Amino acid sequence: MSAQQTAESTNTMKKKILPYLLLTPMILIMGVLVYYPILATFSYSLKKWKLTAPADIHFIGLKNYIDILQSESFWYSMENTLFILVMVVVFTTICGCMVAMFLNIDVRGSGILMALSILPWALPPYVNGVLWKFVFFSGYGFLNKLLLGMGLISHPIEFLSARWTLLLVVSIVVIWRSTPFMALVCLAGRRSIPSQIYEAARGDGATRTATFRYITAPLMLPFVGVGLTSTSVTAINVFDEIVSLSGYSDLGKNILMESYLTTFEFLNFGKGAAMTYLVMFCALILGVLYLRSLNKEVEY
Amino acid sequence: MKKRIISMLLCVVMTATMVAGCGSKKTDSGSSADTATSGEKITFMVPDWGVPTDDQLKEFTDETGIDVEIAEVGWDDIREKLATGASAGKAVADVVEVDWSWVGEFEAADWLEPLEVSDEDKTDIPTIETFTINDKVLAMPYTNDYRLSFYNTKQFEKAGITEEPQTWNDVLEDCRKLKSTGTVEYPFALSLNAEEKTSTCLMWLAYTMNGVVWNDDGTLNKDSAMEALEYMDTLVKEELVAPEDKTSSGMDAYKRICGGTASFLTGPTSFVSRSTNPEECSVIGEITPILVPGKDAKATETMALPEAIGVTKASKNKEAAKKFVEWYTSADMQERLNETNSAIPTRNSVLEKLIQDGKIENAGAMLEEAKLISSPFPNGVPSYYAEMSSAMYNAINKMALGTYTPEQAYEEMASATEKLAKE
């Protein structure tokens, strides 16, 4: 083999190895911080593992999953999760799109308006929950004072004492926090539509409704999809707001709270890990939707 | 070529940084178990109210040569941190806070080192009983909290009630009178929210009514629990407790007595000092601490909810840690911690001295009640306490919200307790 051939062969090898070398740090980071915990959690979920019984840790297969799926408490939490999910997704999308449309109007001080509209998103979820508790509190809540003052009610309404009103309040609080993100995403989508398309539509005599239906809506759809899926994941992972509004009560608990209580309150790491997997599975379905919406082609 | 070298270098640097980041470093700020191997330094994990002053710590160090590093952690987080550390076989600290409600699970998980305590100390500190399982003392109580009753004398007088309530029926009648005369709308301060304090409310109520909460096999005593639940239900139905007590925190419910919106409370001993603090109480001079009522006369026992400190089993400096526990819970330190941290002594001798010296004002029946402390758990606090308490407070909360009858609430908590006891 000539020296030139040897050099070429070395070069080819280097070209083949280099990408892998460059990817190594990220693969290691992802492996250690993401994939290893996922696999470890799965192995925990197949064990009977209660911290208060260290001598009784052993493999039990899918028993944790079966127990969870047969438990009334899990399905109660699942119902609560679905209620919050539907409410949050529907109303965040509507409110987010509306806010985006308003923010798109170019007026003086629109920058300040945009900054103000982002504020709820910047609030820590727990603080957000505490603030709203002052509004809905049964004893001295702002809303009850207002309704009593206006003579609309004679006794304070116990918003946080009944399951569905509590879930409604939780949903409102989460909608309040997630609307700004949805609005920003929609605004980005709206502003990415070239003005020439609107000019052409106007030239063709398109009405406002037709312009919205055939241009704005379809072109914004992928962006709404991103916001919608992100909102869905937020709605599944609600925790702080529920705790700040109703503590660790059974009344408003969702599957994430059920998982937290099982793992860290009752120290049942095996069952807690199985529950975490179920939560992750729900979030994964929505994550897939999120990725698919990113790759969707739009026709207009 | 140059670019390639730079890329390779960056790649190596990133990998090295990551590996270094993932590695553990044995320094002074590392795990306590590592630092404790020197035999001169221990870590003490405690909530803010248990942190000794720098001067107190310096005295301990001068006396013993042991340095103490304080890890101030929120009360809620201590148990979680200890559990996470212990599951990895690590000691998060050499000396840790041990709440009365954690001791059962800590014992089951074998996280605590047994302590040697003299008979004299055992007599002086009745709450040691709570931290004793299978004749082993697992933690030493450092701050006391037991159930004591308080009533607003002025409001009682205004409603025409001249005598202090002796029994729970007296309390009920008095509250009815306070409400019907328009003196106070919701005279009884009671925790009904879905939280730990609500479970303990049922426990002390049943315990002071009948002297029993649990049977020897760990199941709920039906007669006693039902009587307590029905009493609570009556208070709710007759609107003698405030509607917000069902959803606000237990402490907020208790604090109503300091705001003058409640006339009777059976609650933490900290309300002795709260009732004389102008920053916390708007009815100073009106609240009197009294013995907890019972069924036919004053109750002959009360429940304690103290906090203690224990030595972790994974600690590598157990002897130094035990010395610290001994020093921290000594009579002298309890007296000083009352002065610096407002901690209520767990030693009855110290409590008596502080009351006699006038350092604890408006003590009322505080000392007398302290002598009645005993544990309602016949076999010690169970390892499944957290899960059992969760089932209890949720069932009581549902009863308070009108979803359950007392019978349904009892059935739910009894079946959960029985299932847990069998496991």
Image (spheres, helix red, strand yellow):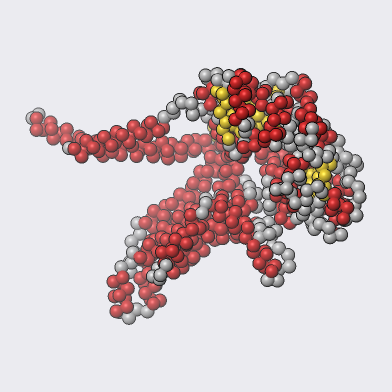
Instruction: Where is residue B145? Give x, y as percent.
Output: 74, 37
For this view, does A49 lie left or right of residue A223? right
Q: In this view, does B262 lie above or below B307?
A: below
Front position in the image: A30 or B335: B335
* Residue B110 visible somewhere in the drawing: no
Looking at the image, which residue is at 48% across and 50% down? A283
| Quadrant location of the C terminus of chain B in the rendered image | top right
- Tell me where residue B258 appears, x and y as whole percent: 75, 49
Q: In which quarter of the image is residue B318?
A: top right
Does B96 appear above or below A75? Answer: above
The residue sitting at 72% across, 21% down in the picture is B117
Give the x, y percent position of residue B112: 63, 26
| Foreground of the two, A190 or A273 | A190
Is B100 or B349 nearer to us in this picture?
B349
The mark tally for this picture is 0
The front one of A142 and A16 is: A142
Q: Which residue lies furthest to the bottom in this view?
A: A205
Q: Is residue B283 visible?
A: yes
Residue B289 position within the rendered picture, expressed as x and y whole percent measured from the top left: 82, 42
Q: Which residue is depicted at the point 40% across and 68% down?
A: A104
Quadrant where the N terminus of chain B sits is top left
Left or right: where does residue A120 sit relative to residue B221? Answer: left
Q: Is residue B4 left or right of residue A155?
A: left
Say which residue appears at 65% left-offset and 32% top-offset.
Answer: B98
